[in-house]
Image (tube, rainbow, N blue to C red):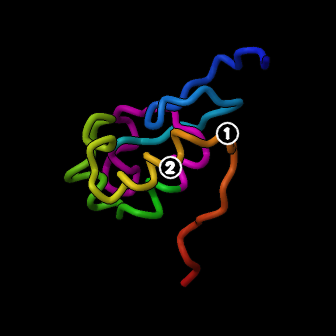
Amino acid sequence: MSAPTGHRCGLCEREVQSTSRHHLVPREEGGKYGPTVDLCQPCHSSVHRFLSNRALARQYSSVEALRAAEELQTYLRWIRRQRVERISNRRGRR
C-alpha cells in the first residue's frame, strides 16, 4: 500500500506524485493573472494536445467545462484507470 502523496489532479482527480499549474485561460489569451488549477502531467499535456489556446480561453475556462469537453472524454476514461505519472504526447513540432 503506497503512502498518500497529497497531490490530486484537478481534472482526472487521481492522486499523483506531482502537479503543475494550468491557467484556465491561457496566458497567451490574457489569463496571466486569472484562475489556475493543478493538473497532473498527463492531463496538462493532453489538455494542450487536444484543445487550442483559443478554445481553452473561449469555451473551457473552468474545470467543469474542461471535464465536460467532448475532445477529452476518451482520454479521461482512459487516464482514470491508469497509474501513470508521465506521458509523452506533446504537440507536434512545427
At x 40% / y 63%, what residue is drawn? 50
Instruction: Write down the quadrant of residue 62 in the picture.
Output: top left
Q: Is residue 62 above or below residue 44?
A: above
Across and down, in percent, residue 68 comes to 26, 44
Give the Cα distance between marks 2 and 1: 10 Å
Q: Residue at x 69, y 42 (%)?
A: 85
Q: Position of residue 48 (x, y in %)?
A: 45, 58
Which region of the structure is painted magenta? 25-45
What residue is pinned by disc 2?
78
Per the image, the residue denoted by label 1 is: 83
Task: Please tell me whether residue 81 belongs to the stretch shown in magenta.
Answer: no
Q: Position of residue 77 (x, y in %)?
A: 44, 46
Report whether 20 appears left or right of 71.
right
Quadrant containing the N terminus in the rendered view: top right
Indicate the secondary structure of the residue bearing disc 1.
loop
Position of 64 relative to 79 (above/below): above
Q: Amino acid at mark 2?
A: Trp
For the C terminus, give its image quadrant: bottom right
Which residue type carries mark 1?
Arg
- Residue in view at x 20 percent, y 51 percent: 59
- Helix, strand or loop at label 2? It is helix
Q: Residues within 10 Å of mark 1 (few under 14, many from 20)?
A: few
| 75, above or below 22, in the image | below
